[in-house]
Amino acid sequence: MAVGTLAAAPRARLGRAARRAAHLLAVLLLVTLAAAALVDLVPGSPAVAILGPSATPQQIAELDAAYGFDRPFPERYLDWVGGLVTGDLGRSVQSGRPVLATILERLPVTLEIALLAVGISLLVAVPLGVHTGSRVGGPLDRAVTAASSALMSIPVFVAGVVLIYLLALTTGWFPVSGWAPLTDGIAANLHFAFLPAVALAVGETPALLRLLRGDVAATLREDFVRTAATRGLPRRYILFRHVLRPSALPLVTMAAVVFGRLLAGSVVVESLFALPGLGGLALQSIPAKDIPVIQGLVVLVAVAYVAVNALVDLGYTVLDPRTRSR
């Protein structure tokens, strides 16, 4: 019986991996279909919407032919997906540059801001969540709960404006806007990246903190934790060795969701701090109806969510080995 169980374990893992891969591929299929259909959702002719009412029939016909707006949807979709697989997302209507090169040029800024925001949120949420979860109802717990409730109600643009006033205009510690790439040095880069990342983290930290606090409080009531306490193990060791690890599973999922949301929704912060990221690119492309760039951004966000979900699955197997056999 034990041998059969061991032999079935690899097959179960392969089946689980196949189901997850099928689910992620289905998501990508739906997203690519929706992105390709953006052309058909534009009222009237996409070329007229892009060029404006003063465009001549010849200019409209040339743009339709150049970008395939006049082709049937199935043909256009298959051609676009074929280019997507090979890394060819077409050319921007505005600049004429390859869409993929334009997105990859902007991606590092948004990616860094999102990662920094999640990192700052976790640096604050993990120690406070563990401490307040282990002392529910204590003075610090009440203070942190009240502060998190207040922070959750602050829109990101308000947090950004307050941070600019306090840490840029008043003290001059940080620049109001602009960007320095990593090639200029880590110190210069973080000098520009810190305030936007904190502005994003202000709204995300309370949710992560509350989630971990509740899970820690629930885990502390488990029998294995009580057994560890009766063995005389130090409280700090119990919290960070026996309690934090199982309590961190929902936190990993939430952090991944937060990262995906920040990657897709950094428009406000990037416009406020004048950052050359994907949010700024979206702000330029949407009013100009630059459909190839908009399609590329939609697919990028979908791929990011798929990749993040795959990493979450891997993280689960590391944090909780029991999930490997499910």
Image (cartoon, grey):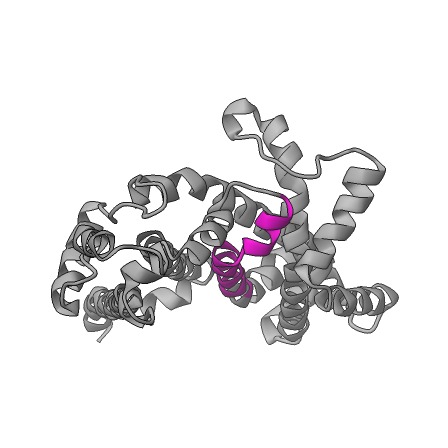
The quarter of the rendered structure image containing the N terminus is bottom left
Q: Position of residue 295 (x, y in %)?
A: 32, 57
Q: Residue at x 66, y 40 (%)?
A: 194
Residue 168 drawn in magenta: no
- Between 310 and 110, which is closer to the camera in this rendering? 110
Q: Main secondary structure of the magenta part?
A: helix
Q: Quadrant of residue 239?
A: bottom right
For the record, the magenta segment spans 251-273
Where 166 falls versus 236 (above or below)?
above
- In the displayed orientation, state which residue is furthest to the right: 139
Q: Is residue 238 visible?
A: no
Where 299 falls versus 44 (above or below)?
above
Q: Is residue 283 visible?
A: yes
Q: Position of residue 153 (x, y in %)?
A: 73, 69
Quick check: 189 left or right of 281? right
Q: Quadrant of residue 53?
A: bottom left
The quarter of the rendered structure image containing the C terminus is bottom left
Where 8 falls versus 260 (above or below)?
below
Q: Residue at x 53, y 61 (%)?
A: 258
How many badges with numbers are in the image? 0
Quick check: 171 left or right of 233? right
- Between 310 and 231, which is closer to the camera in this rendering? 310
Q: Position of residue 10 (x, y in %)?
A: 22, 64
Where 145 falls versus 310 (above or below)?
below
- In the displayed orientation, state which residue is furthest to the left: 75
Q: Residue at x 15, y 54 (%)?
A: 82
Quick check: 160 left or right of 300? right
Q: Residue at x 63, y 69 (%)?
A: 211
Residue 260 drawn in magenta: yes
Q: Position of residue 47 (x, y in %)?
A: 28, 59
